[in-house]
Every structure is written in C-alpha cells, then in structure tokens.
Image (cartoon, rainbow, N blue to C red):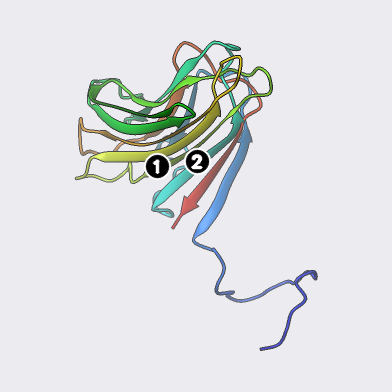
Amino acid sequence: AESMNLADTYAFTGTVTGTPADVKLISTTTISGTPSTLEWKDSSLSGELDFSTYQYFTVNIHYFTHSSGSTSKNLYGRFIDASGNALTGSSYRYASNNANRNGNADFGADASDSILLTRDSSGGHSDRSSFIQMQIQDVNKTGKKKMMTWYFSNENHDVTSHLLATVGTGVWTGTSNALGGWQIYFDGSSFENGGVIKLYGHK
C-alpha cells in the first residue's frame, strides 16, 4: 500500500470501502418560531423518515431549552399514528433512570398517555441548555409494538445548577399496526428558538 497525505484533498471515483456509508446525516435544522412540538414523520406523511432506505433513525438536539425561563418543565414524547396525529391514549409504558449529584432515581409507568423523557428541565437562562439523543425505530412496520430509546442531559433550574442525566426506553402497546412517527413536547411550554436538530439515518 502507498502512503497518503491526509492533509490533501482527494476526489474518489468508483466504490470506496471502509467508510461509514451506512450512517447518513439527513438534515440539520434550527428551532425557530417557538413551536409547541417537534415532530419526525414517515415519508408517507411527507416527512423525513424514509424507512424504505433506512432501518432506523437517530435524532440529536443540541443546546435546546423551553421558553419558560427558570421555571422547571418536564419533557414528554408520543408516537404519531398513520394519519399524522399524536397517540394520546393510556397505552404507553416507559422506564428510565435519572442521575444527579444526589444519586439516582428510577421512573416508569404502565398506563400513561405519554412517555416522560426527563423531569425538571430548565429554561433558557444563565446559559443553561439541554441535549437529547433519540432513536426512532421501525414505526412503519406491522406485527410488533413500537419502541424507542433516549439519552438526555441538562442543567436544571436551581440557583446552583445541577447536571441531570436521563436514559430510558418506552413502548406504545395500543397496536402493532404501522405508525407515522414520533413527537416531543414540554408540559405547558414551547421550545425556545436556537436549538439545533440533526437527523441521521442508519441503513
């Protein structure tokens, strides 16, 4: 093998192996208009989730907050049905672990109308913000209940900020039919402008 100067620029033709071609950055968007929900929908609903190309998707949201200042708010998630509407029935189950400087706390529910992604998230004050990573898997398939996983970190709203980390999983048990996507929202607040959303597809 010959050596290559990695500081140079190369134009490749043909097939290049050994690259992460099975993961693709699909879109990068910035939150604007203080939306009450953020949604990712199946391509059948004119959304970005093209399951004919990708097996599952990862959503990263960087430096996001809600618009209620220092007031603490909970962040929730819901699946979207095949018609594009949020599923609000009491058929969610979830389990998560929340870690902070005072120790760990487990949260969960068997008959909830949404999935609690994190508690006591701070708004956009004193330069504090949140990060979340979510995996959206196979919502368009039939025969299996739909699940998702997430990781969340933020500084909560106390005068002396405390770092909170949450990891969890949730499922919609109401049907094994195809669904249309996934949404998140703050309880009683909206998203503050400026957070950056990156959507990745995994083949």
Q: For marks 1 and 2, give the CA distance.
A: 8 Å
**Residue found 44% across the figure and 15% down from its top:** 187
Q: Nearer the viewer, residue 73 or 143?
A: 73
Where residue 39 appears, as percent x and y from the top left, is 47, 30
Which quadrant of the rendered structure holds the N terminus?
Answer: bottom right
Residue 130 x/y as whole percent: 56, 29
- Residue 202 can be seen, yes or no: yes
Three-letter code for the amino acid on which mark 2 is drawn: Val
Q: Earlier in the sequence, mark 1 or mark 2?
A: 2
Q: Residue furthest right?
A: 8
Across the whole image, how many numbered discs are drawn on residues? 2
Q: Are marks 1 and 2 in contact (CB under 8 Å)?
A: yes
- Mark 2 is surrounded, within 10 Å at the Cα level, by few (under 14), some (14 to 19) or many (20 or more) other residues, namely some
For the point 62% across and 36% down, the residue is 29
Q: Element under label 2?
A: strand
Residue at disc 1, secondary structure:
strand
Instruction: Tell me the quarter of the picture where residue 203 sits.
Output: bottom left
Residue 40's label in the rendered image is none
Query: Which numbered tag is attached to residue 136?
Result: 1
